Each structure stands twice: as C-alpha cells, then as structure tokens.
Amino acid sequence: MARDLEPTLELARERAEMLRRELETHNYRYYVLDDPVIPDAQFDKMMRELEKIEKQFPSLVTPYSPTQRVGGKPREGFTTVRHLMPMLSLSNAFNENELRDFDRRVRQAIPGETVEYVVELKIDGLAVSLYYENGVLLRGATRGDGETGEDISENLKTVRSVPLRLRRPVPGLEVRGEAYMSKESFARLNEAREEVGEPLFANPRNAAAGTLRQLDPRVTASRRLDLFVYSIGYSEGVNPAGHAAVLSLLKELGFKVNPEYRLFSNLDEVIDYCHHWQTRRFNLPYAIDGLVLKVNSMSLQEKLGATMKSPRWAIAYKFPAEQAISTVRNIFVRVGRTGALTPTAELDPVRLAGTTVSRATLHNEDNIKEKDIRIGDRVLVQKAGDIIPEIVSVLPEKRTGSEVVWSMPFECPACGSNVMRAGGEAAARCTGIACPERLWEGLVHFASRNAMDIEGLGPAVIAQLLSARLIADPSDLYTLRYDDLKPLERLGPKSIRNLLGAIEASKDASLARLVFALGIRHVGERAAKILAGHYESLDRLMFATQEELLSIPEIGAKIAASVVAFFSSEQNRKVIKKLVEAGVNTHAKKNGHSEGGRILEGKVIVLTGVLKDLSRRQAQELIETMGGRVSSSVSSNTDFVIVGENPGSKYNKALSLGVTILGETEFNELINRKGNKLTPLI
Ligand code: IVH
C-alpha cells in the first residue's frame, strides 16, 4: 500500500516544485518588475493547484512555498531577535551647506582617494532586516533599537515583493530595506479608520509600522505593504566591491530595488539631484522624506567606519516639511459609509506639495476643539504623508475677532436624523438607515457575500438603482420588477432574471445574516450570530433592552448601546417593517432546521473534501447556528469529521484517531432530524 503511493508522491513533489517556480517567477514579474506576463486568473489557477497538492500531501509543503505567505495565526506577541550586525541610523543634512560639510569630512578622512556617491531616495517607511540561508527566507525583523528588533517574519512574508526564496541561492545573506505603504493604500486605510472611529495614522511611516506590528498576519496582508531593499548587512559567498554593485546584485537575487538611484562623482551633481526630487517627489506613488548619499566603494566605507549611531560614509538629505498658510472659509460635514460625520474645512486655494489645496480634513470635533480652529482663521496647512491636507495649527495672532466658533450639527445635514456620538468615540454619526449619503454604502454591505449574499447586486448596479430612484432603502430591493430594471444600462435580460432570482433567494437568508446586513455599528458577523441565536427573531431583538443585551456573553456595552440606538430610530423600524412585509425571513429558522434547536451544541466538527449540497461557508454557518464549532484540524477533541468528495489528510487522521466520520448524507439526516439528540446516530 505504502509502496503504491510512492510514485504518486514523487510525481506530486515534482509538480509542486514546478508550480512553485512558475508562481515565484510570476510573482516576481508582477510585484517586483511591475511587468506581469500572465492574467491573474491563470496565476490563481496555478496557486489553487499547488494548494490542492499540498493539502493532499502535507509533507510536500515547504516554508518558501507561495502558499505560505499568509499561513500564520494571530500571535500573542513578538519575540526579540539580535541583529547579526547592528542596524545603524543616518545623520541628517537639512541644506546644501550641510551636504558640503559632509563631503569635506569624507574627503579629509580618506585623503587622495577618488570618492563616488550613490544617491538613493529616502523612503518614508520602516527599516527591516531579512535573513536568508541557502536562498530561503528564515527570518524578518524590525530595526528596533538597532541592536535588537522584533521577529516579524509572518508579517513580512505577506509582502509580495519579499522573495521567500532567492532567484539564486547564496549561503548566507542578511539584507536591509524599507517597508512602506503607498500613498494610495495609506489614504485608503485612513479613510476606513476615520469611518469606524479608529485613530488615524499621521503618515505612511506610522501606518507601515502599525501594520508590521500587527499580531494577526491576515491584517498585515490586507493592508498592502511593499519593500525596497537598499543594503546588505551580512553576507557569505557574495562580496560586491561597491554599493551600486550591491544594488545590482540585490536586484538579480529577486529583490525590489528602487530604480531611482544614481552614481555621481562630484558633489554638485549630487546637490542637483537632490533639488530635482524636491518637487518631483509629489509625483511618486510612495512618500519619500529626502535622499540618502552613500560612498560607493566598500573598502572606503570600511576605512571611514562609523560612530556609535551612524556610518561616516553616508548621510540623509532631508526635505524641509512643506507647509502653507491659508484661510478657513467654511466648515462643512461629509457623511460616510457608517454614518460618520467628518468635518472638512473649505480653504482659500493654496499651492502645497505639488497640488492646489482647497480643502482639509478636520477629522473630528475634538481635533477642532483642541486646535481651536474657527471659521475665518488663518491656518498652517500640511499634507499627511504627502497626500491628505490637514491643518497643523491656527495663527492666533492673525485673528480679527470676526472668527466664528463651529460646532457639530445635532441633525444629519443629509437626512435630518439625529446625530449621535457614542461615549469614548471620536466620530459623531448619523443614525438614519435611509440617509441618502449612507445609503449606497449601506446597500453594498446589505447585498454583500457575508450579508444577504445577493449575487449580481454590486456597487455599480446599486448606484444605477439609486440614481434611477428605484430604491431608497434595502426593503425596496424586494419590490423590484423585471420592467423596472429593463431600462438600466448594461443589464441584459439574463442578468435581470438572475438578479431578481438572487434577490428573491435572499429572503431565505438566516436571521444572523439579516442582522449583520442591517449594518448596525459594532455588530459584525460574530455578534450578529450571537444575537440571532439568543433572540431567535428580529421582533424580539428589536425590543431588547440594554441590560438584557449586556447579560449575553460576548455582548459588550458598545454593541448593546449601538443595537438599542439602531432600533430606536423610527426610520430604521419603518425599513424593517417593509422587509418583513416583503417576506424576508426574520426568524431563526432556515431550511427547516431550527436555529434555536442547537442540536450540535458544544460539538467540535471538522470538514474535509467537497460537499455536494453545501459550500464550506454554508456548512460552517449551519453547524454554528446549531451550536457547533468548526475546527480546521482533527484532534482527539474532534467530535466528528464530515467527509465530502476527495477528502484530504484530515480523513486519514480521523481514521487513525478513531474519530466518528459522517458522509454528507448522514450529516444531512442528522441535521434534518429536528430535536433529535446526537446519540442515536453517532
Ligand atoms: S541606509 C547605515 N538607505 O532612513 C545606513 N536608509 O535615518 C542605514 N531609509 O533607518 C540606512 N530609505 O529606515 C538607507 N535608501 C535608503 C533609505 C533609508 C529610507 C531609512 C531607514 C533608516 C533611516 C535612517
């Protein structure tokens, strides 16, 4: 038996290795060279095949497999690592004279030598170190205090431009570089944080640092960091003679090296190059805060040496912070997705960091109060991370006395609903579910896969429905007819029928999905499940009191307050009434199973293989609504394993541990027997 398996394992090993090489090459082309040669779908297909092989033959998984980029589970904390060589910092020059002083010091220390400088962009991110042995990434760490840093390997592996394996093996190599977040990702991240009332990152560097120190690598993966590599800290088997050669070697090995570095042999050219970037930096997709000059020759670097803190062969030229003075003409509020009201200043247009700025975010009420910003004030403006204009401070000496103190409106400017500010939160919010400003985002959430799962009802279609005034709240979706949709652009007869079918089908969604879909603040998927399981009907949930909600395990004060506030809105209650009238399920029952029956209470269940009737997600949901928990691995604590077609290694593990195994039919029988105890069947 074991012998029969060997040829298959060998074939699988070869195939897996081939797929890994292919995937590495395409990953490199896409994320490092920015020059993809195959469509994403083809990449995904190869990835799925590799995942399948590795699932079937877990012994074939390698630490550098592209499947391992987001493998890690949330951690308790990071371990400390000592750097092989200290990671030094740079001394700074703030103007041309200080650069000339640096050049003079260098030349005096090594008289008679020809000095060449490599000049690089100084990326505004976070220094990290990556250690490879025989070409395989073993560890990634933060700079920390220069001597010791934190082991953030799992997080760095999620960065797609970090090679998990080098394009050519080198016995030992420690490289250093700057992890950073692009201006676009930074802006998007802050926008999302502002919406949910989380503190904003002041610049991309803080955002990158916060992201790399995330304990859950899945969060890091979702935030899209990138990495430019700029030096070698330690090496065995390679020994380039100059810094420019180091950069070429790093490129050759598969790292992303910033392409804007230049080699100069005289300082005037260096200074010109620095000035060149002073204005052009605003066109870059990532933030830089200056340039770095490095003596090219490695032997001269060695001769020059270092002080305790920084090398004598390098210096950072720092750009002056770009600020401008303008006048606050007015303050208005924008309403965001979750109803967050963001005060925004209208400014007299002013040139700043490459663009004309006429608005600045004021973030929230507290920020305005702290800085005492009034309408009519002269203010100092700068861009956070080169991109989001904000007010640094007011210039009180310019006040005339006619300035007007601003305060947050009590009513939403878009719909007139009450504005609420929950204790401990920075953001004030509109409480109206049918607020037109919130509507679009709210509907996108309502229809999304984890909520009502209405396929075909994406952001674009929702925008069309709204602008044609066919819908004004989620309940209107259920009254749409074929003829209503016919005039819409880009919707053919088939898509219309599919869409109406999907809307109809969503009426049967579980109560937990509906509660999640309503978009109640702080009520995520898990809280929605708990609430649905506890109350078993929307009616009962609607009349829940704060005390009652607080008595439910895992429901805290924030959620309780938000649920009560949500259902106390007359507008929200109206929408819910219409949902009920349209026939949307508001009870904890689905497919005849009693959600409240909880016949799987406390059971730990593992799924393996492909189920015919249910997707993984559906099966998991079903098990959870019946009180069970789905686990990803089989152990002696597993109560039973449900086996579909082509089961993976979990099946064998279950056999060897003697865990009860159920086929799909048996599972269906089990859950269809309402009220049955588990014992008779298993
Ligand atoms: S070289 C000993 N090159 O700037 C030399 N640093 O203040 C170490 N940085 O900690 C750094 N871009 O985080 C170097 N092209 C570049 C850089 C760069 C950004 C950062 C790095 C370093 C800090 C120095």
Image (cartoon, rainbow, N blue to C red):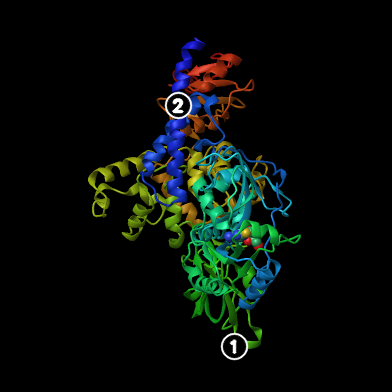
In-image side of 304 versus 355 (left or right): right
In-image side of 564 versus 451 (left or right): right
Name the residue type under label 2: Glu
Depth check, front residue: 653 or 159: 159
Residue 671 position within the rendered picture, expressed as x and y whole percent measured from the top left = 49, 23
How dense is the environment of label 1, judged by Cα within 10 Å: few (below 14), some, or many (20 and up)?
Answer: few
| Disc 1 secondary structure class | loop
Quarter for ligand 1? bottom right
Residue 567 position within the rendered picture, expressed as x and y whole percent measured from the top left = 54, 52
- Residue 88 appears in which quarter of the rendering? bottom right
Depth check, front residue: 449 or 35: 35
Q: CA distance from mark 2 to mark 1?
A: 78 Å
**Residue 596 versus residue 233 in the image, above or below:** above
Q: Are marks 2 and 1 in contact (CB under 8 Å)?
A: no
Q: Is residue 332 visible?
A: no
**Residue at 54% across / 32% down in the picture?**
625
Residue 316 position within the rendered picture, expressed as x and y whole percent measured from the top left = 63, 66
The circle on residue 588 is none
Residue 195 position within the rendered picture, expressed as x and y whole percent measured from the top left = 54, 59
Residue labelled with disc 2:
14
- Residue 11 appears in which quarter of the rendering? top left
- First in sequence: mark 2 or mark 1? 2
Depth check, front residue: 468 or 209: 209
Depth check, front residue: 564 or 2: 2
The circle on residue 402 is 1
Residue that lies at the very extreme toward the front in this rendered image: 112
